[in-house]
Amino acid sequence: MVLPNRDQAQVADEKLTQYLLALNHPVGHSKAVFFRGVGYDESNIEKLRDGLLTIAKNEDAQEEISTEYGMKYVIHGSLNAPSGRTVFVTTVWIIEEDETSPRFVTAYPADDEEES
């Protein structure tokens, strides 16, 4: 299934800098270790954002989950990391009640983490 309104998908800078890349975040720490380990940091968040948006816009959602806040969509895809490695990630997007644009929630290594 296609992520609804995927051309309107949004990734907030704060979600990347204060969560996904934040080594001191209680929930995001392990994700930060992974993403920093493949070369992402504050100097290249645009590359990370663009990669996540490419996944949202080009890959099919594998799951649709109804929550009290809206519909969540789980999408698997790959990122060409700054380290030169291709990493496979699971991304989660939400379309909140009374909203139409998908918003990035999180990303983490997929089961088949790497190709090269």
Image: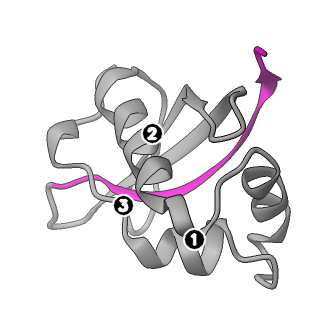
Residues rendered magenta in the picture: 101-116
Task: Tell me the number on the disc at residue 51.
Answer: 2
Which sits earlier in the primary sequence, circle 2 or circle 1? 1
Q: Is residue 4 above or below residue 47?
A: above
Which sits earlier in the primary sequence, circle 1 or circle 3? 3
Circle 2 crowding by C-alpha within 10 Å: few under 14, some 14–19, many from 20? some
Q: Residue at x 76, y 44 (%)?
A: 38
The answer to whether residue 37 is left or right of residue 88 is right
Q: CA distance from mark 3 to mark 2?
A: 11 Å
Residue on which disc 1 sits: 42
Residue on which disc 3 sits: 11
- The amino acid type found where label 2 is placed reads Gly
Q: Position of residue 106 (x, y in %)?
A: 57, 57
- The amino acid type found where label 1 is placed reads Glu
- The amino acid type found where label 3 is placed reads Val
Q: Position of residue 64 (x, y in %)?
A: 44, 36
- Residue toward you, 94 or 32: 32
Q: Position of residue 78 (x, y in %)?
A: 58, 26
Circle 3 crowding by C-alpha within 10 Å: few under 14, some 14–19, many from 20? some
Between marks 3 and 2 in the image, the one whose residue lies nearer the viewer: 2
Picture quadrant where residue 59 is located: top left
Q: CA distance from mark 1 to mark 3?
A: 14 Å
Q: Residue at x 38, y 55 (%)?
A: 94
Picture quadrant where residue 54 is located: top left
Q: CA distance from mark 2 to mark 1?
A: 15 Å
Q: Residue at x 82, y 71 (%)?
A: 29
